[in-house]
Image (cartoon, rainbow, N blue to C red):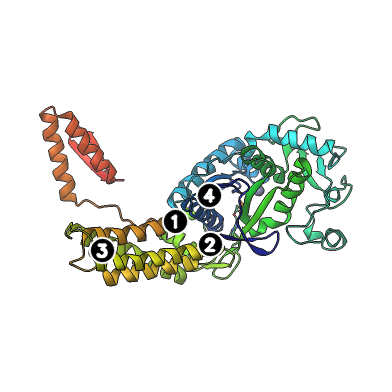
Amino acid sequence: MKIYNTLTKKKEEFVPIEPGKVRMYVCGPTVYNYIHIGNARPMIVFDTVRRYMEHKGYEVNYVSNFTDVDDKIIKKSVEEGVDASVISERYIAECKKDMEGLNVRPATTHPKATEEIGGMLDMIKTLIEKEHAYTGADGTVYFRTRSFKDYGKLSHKNIDDLRGGNRSLLVSGEDQKEDPLDFVLWKPKKEGEPYWESPWCNGRPGWHIECSVMSKKYLGDEIDIHAGGEDLIFPHHENEIAQSEAANDKVFARYWMHNAFLNIDNKKMSKSAGNFFTVREISEKYDLQVVRFFMLSAHYRSPLNFSAELMAAAKNGYDRIVTSVSNLKYLMDNAASSPRSEEEEALLKEAEKLAVKFDDAMEDDFNTADAISVIFELVKFANQNAVEGKSKSFLQALRDKIIMLSDICGLIVEKKEELLDTEIEQLIEERQAARKNKDFGRADEIRDELFEKGILLEDTREGVKWKRA
Ligand code: AMP
Ligand code: ZN
């Protein structure tokens, strides 16, 4: 399995620290609003990386944080006159709903910055003891960037260039700093802001320290993969490396993966230009499975443009897979349960070759664009070879293969079996009859069966009402 490593600018063979296990950290969103469609890209991409690794038999410990203390969260809490935690908890819950819609699996752990302050204080203390950090007059703690000799190794920036010219590359220019390159680890509270006590001042952490601390706590000092959008390479990930390696004296992460940006109609997403969409808004227009398909139709390191035309093409592509899977189901239900013929066995060997081709694409730095093309080849193969007269077992094997490869991409292509209104009403009548006969076991069974098919029952005075979930 080859991964493009931002650190070395090369595709490298993936070798985990511990055989069979992957320790992976993905920087998560700051929760002050619904997540936008750009935020969805790293979620989908790295969820797919995780799924593929699990398919290959790795046990993946996947950690992704929620940044729940930040200027934007505080601003919104002041506007609404509520506690900052009300804002962050609200948008964490909403983010989880969007993730579910996009079929992004919950991380093994989703730590929150506000619950990890103790670990941050410990790491800052260590950095001060080791003289990698110092305190300014007002109690702000800064990282002494020049004390970390490898600074710039991820973003391939020369520390002297940073100092010499481009001030926009600097983190900020507070005058208490020994050096403009130094960045904040801990800062004093402002009036009305949430704060924590510390040996330096009552205040709150800088942004970068949380990821170093959470990664250490949940994955250990050394991890396999650290990931996020490419805007995080500098300064966020560069600063994470400096903090973690200076504190732990270990190589922080072996592979650094970064997704390219998602643009809208070839323009950078921006609220003021009006080309800004949340996942929630998009979900009113498109099935989120189509959004996931769209995101994976490009390689994660290529910029991706979101437009109505490309979404229409994605819908076509996704529907093609869903239709094939559903046709196979229809054929299967009407096929004979005879053993597979020799011809069928030979055809399945052909299909197996396509599954290998799918893996080859994914092994090449998770080339989901090529992997999806292979799913299309398999769909075409199935459409050509799944005809009447074929055995149930053959049809099922083909169908399972398409579903399995789609599932590695996190694409749900198996339509929920939909019940007709008349079928639902029949079952409800049967349930009523069962209840009358005090056969409550059967009555519950019917309720559960309907529930599984997305039908909710409500017993009212006027009788049983039902609705689709
Ligand atoms: P943020 O909440 O801004 O820290 O972003 C959360 C994650 O989304 C980070 O990994 C960002 O790099 C990523 N991200 C933000 N905007 C975009 C975009 N337009 N395209 C792709 N990734 C993005
Ligand atoms: Zn981070």
In this rendering, the answer to whether 141 lies above or below 356 is above
Camera-side residue: 88 or 110? 110
Residue at the image point whose x is 52% and y is 44% from the top: 107
Numbered disc 4: secondary structure = loop
First along the sequence among labels 1 and 4: 4
First along the sequence among labels 3 and 1: 3
Q: Identify the image quadrant of the C terminus.
A: top left
Q: CA distance from mark 3 to mark 1?
A: 21 Å
Residue 86 position in % (x across, y down): 56, 37
Residue highlighted by disc 1: 408
Q: CA distance from mark 3 to mark 2?
A: 30 Å
Numbered disc 2: secondary structure = helix
Relative to residue 353, is residue 124 drawn left or right? right
- Mark 4 packing: few (<14 Cα in 10 Å), some, or many (20+)? many
First along the sequence among labels 1 and 2: 2
Which callout, 3 or 1, points to the residue nearer the camera?
1
Residue highlighted by disc 2: 363
First along the sequence among labels 3 and 4: 4
Which callout, 1 or 4, points to the residue nearer the camera?
1
Q: Quadrant of residue 184?
A: top right
Residue highlighted by disc 3: 327
